[in-house]
Image: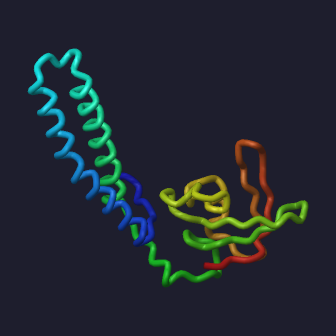
Amino acid sequence: MADTILLTKENLEQLKAKEAELLIEKPQVIKRIELARSHGDLKENADYHAARERLGLLEGQLEFVRDRIARAEIIDTSKMSTDKVIMGTRVKVEDVDGEIEYFHVVSDMDAGTTDEKVSINSPIGKALIGKKIGDNVSIKIPRGTLNYKILDISL
């Protein structure tokens, strides 16, 4: 069985909404294919080829979304504590030069929307998970190694 995917309830609802959108669009694309097919010669029928390509993309997106929904494990953020870093927590760290940085450990779906948000599966996210205030963390990234001390953990 494939690994579970940690999601918030909101993430799961977003996935279900995306699935619903795709399921609405799919029959419309199938009708476009049928209409284009009725125009005859398919070799040079741009509408037909565009609709077939869109259908392929839709089916791929549906498969991806359904897989994520099937593997979802919901994290209840209302029951989280801040004694250690887990998905959903914000982490205040200090590097060796005294620079302060903040990381918000989030699901893969939410990562990357801001520089502060890091995926639970990223090198930074993986290194921070389970750590407590006062812990030192060394994080190997492509550019080298980041060294931090955890100053605060919050929701």
The answer to whether 134 is drawn above or below residue 99 in the figure is: below
- Give the x, y percent position of residue 134: 78, 75
Dividing the picture into quadrants, the one containing residue 12 is bottom left
Relative placement, left or right, of 31 versus 132 is: left
Relative placement, left or right, of 70 versus 34 is: right
- Could you tell me which residue is drawn at 49 percent across and 78 percent down? 77
> Could one spot residue 61 in this view of the protein?
yes
The answer to whether 62 is drawn above or below residue 98 in the figure is: above
Nearest to the observer: residue 144 or residue 34? 34
- Could you tell me which residue is drawn at 42 percent across and 70 percent down? 10
> Could one spot residue 126 in this view of the protein?
no
Q: Residue furthest front?
A: 39
Q: Residue furthest right?
A: 97
Nearest to the observer: residue 115 or residue 68? 115
- By what rule are the colours in the image chosen? rainbow
- Give the x, y percent position of residue 119: 57, 58
- Could you tell me which residue is drawn at 24 percent across and 28 percent down? 47
Total numbered labels? 0
- Could you tell me which residue is drawn at 64 percent across and 53 percent down? 123
The answer to whether 147 is drawn above or below residue 13 in the figure is: above
The answer to whether 118 is drawn above or below residue 51 in the figure is: below
Dividing the picture into quadrants, the one containing residue 31 is top left
- Give the x, y percent position of residue 150: 76, 71
- Give the x, y percent position of residue 94: 82, 67
Relative placement, left or right, of 147 versus 57 is: right
* Quadrant the C terminus occupies: bottom right
Dividing the picture into quadrants, the one containing residue 9 is bottom left
